[in-house]
Structure formats: C-alpha cells, structure tokens
Amino acid sequence: MIATPRLLIIDDDVKLGRLLREYLEPLGYCVEVMHDGKDGLQEAIQGDYAAVILDVMLPGLNGFDVLREIRKHSTVPILMLTALSQEPDRIAGLEVGADDYLPKTFSTRELLARLRAVLRRSVLTAQQEDLSREATLSIGELWIDPSARTASIGEKPLSLTSTEYDILLALARSVGRVKTREQLLIDAANRNFEVFDRSIDVHVSSLRRKLGDDPKAPRYIETVRSIGYRMKKPGDN
C-alpha cells in the first residue's frame, strides 16, 4: 500500500489555503494548513511531511525565519511563495534553503508540476540509496558520500540543502567537465530550464560560501562563462 503524501501549507491567506487543499486532496495528497509562522514551524518540525509550501509574509514569524529554523532540523523539500515583483525575496529564499519558489500569481497546474518535481526527486533519492552504495568521492579536501548524502571539507561536515547537495554531487561526478545550468537544474531540481532562471546561480553561490570557495580563485567550483559550472580537478590552475 502506497502511503498518501502529506503536505504542509504555511500561509496566512485563509482563502488560498482552503483553495489549495480543495485542489490537492482529490489528487491524492493529505493537506494540513497553518496560518501562523510559529505554529507552522512547530508543525513542520514535528510532522512527517513530504513537502512544505511556505509563504514569505507570515504573522508571528516571517517565512525566511521559519525556513532557517526548519533547515536546522530537516531537509524536507520546501516551495517558497513570493510576490511576483520581489526577485530579492526569491533569491533570499533559495539562499536560506528553499528548494524552489513560485510567485503568488502561480497557476494550480504550475504548483502541481513543481510539487511533483520535488517529491519525485525525494523518492528517486531514497530508491537510489536503497539500491546501491556509491563509493565516496574525494576532490582535494572535499569528501562526498552519496550513500549517506553527506559532504565534508576535511573533517568538517557541510550543512547543505537537498538541492545544494544534488548540485555538488552532479558536479563532483563530472569532475573536470562542464555542466550547463540546464543540466544542473534537471539534475538537482528535476525541472526544465527557464530563460533568466537564476536559481542555479543562487544555489552555487551558497555552495561556494559553505565550501569557503572564492569565485575569483576557486578551489572547487569554477564558472564557465555563458555556459555553466565545472568542478575543478585537484591541481588545476
């Protein structure tokens, strides 16, 4: 018997929460809706959810703070809802640890497509871990254990979001070879590339900070102008 995916929506818009629940539950999802940041945070940490849909503007605790606290405890996929005109909000959400974002003007079909993408990636990751144990990858002081989905610099563990980890692993598996932004978006977010989509750049920027990597003189992730990124081989100049 396949378990019903449980979704948590944290949004102070009561009407929107009700509409999303009425849309998603007939499609096979069990939906819980919270309207307050603090209550939503507690539910996200304590509940066993397949994904969280999180608004930026919340009473009690804003969405970015909720996201930061969730990431201290969980790698549950999180879709961030932002105002269409507020690109800084979208970028900030990705930097803090959101897996994807949607403007508040989203269509239900787009929401469903994004939701299915993050859930599918989670399921595939679990299946891959069950089926095989891939050898640990080492690149200089960087160590990546695909079976445990962990990474470290020397003996210092890296705290990565699910998307950041998938990007790092995709680059490491292709060390020395260029990966386009489109390839990385498919590998890490399991969705097609969109013109002017900056999400991969934001995730890579966050990865670099956590790796202690200087983008002007990178030890690990090199930008290939107008194309994408490359994991450098040890000793490359």
Image: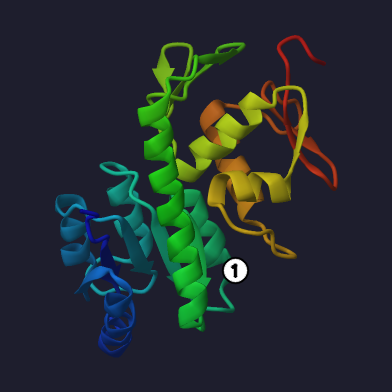
Q: Position of residue 119 (x, y in %)?
A: 40, 55
Query: How many numbered circles are shown?
Result: 1
In the image, farthest residue toward the bottom: 15
Is residue 98 in view? no
Up/down of 115 relative to 145, above or below: below
Is residue 38 in view? yes
In the image, what residue occupies the spot 69% across and 59% down? 193
In the image, what residue occupies the spot 30% across and 58% down? 66
Quick check: 74 left or right of 119? left
In the image, what residue occupies the spot 49% across and 58% down? 117
Q: Position of residue 158 (x, y in %)?
A: 43, 27
Q: Secondary structure at mark 1?
A: helix
User: In which image quadrant can residue 172 be found?
Assistant: top right
Q: State which quarter of the image contains the C terminus.
A: top right
- What amino acid is at disc 1? Glu
Q: Position of residue 232 (x, y in %)?
A: 73, 22
Q: Position of residue 99 (x, y in %)?
A: 47, 53
Up/down of 21 relative to 201, above or below: below
Quick check: 18 left or right of 75? left
Identify residue for label 1: 87
Quick check: 35 left or right of 84? left
Coloration mode: rainbow
In the image, farthest residue toward the front: 1
In the image, what residue occupies the spot 29% across and 90% down? 15
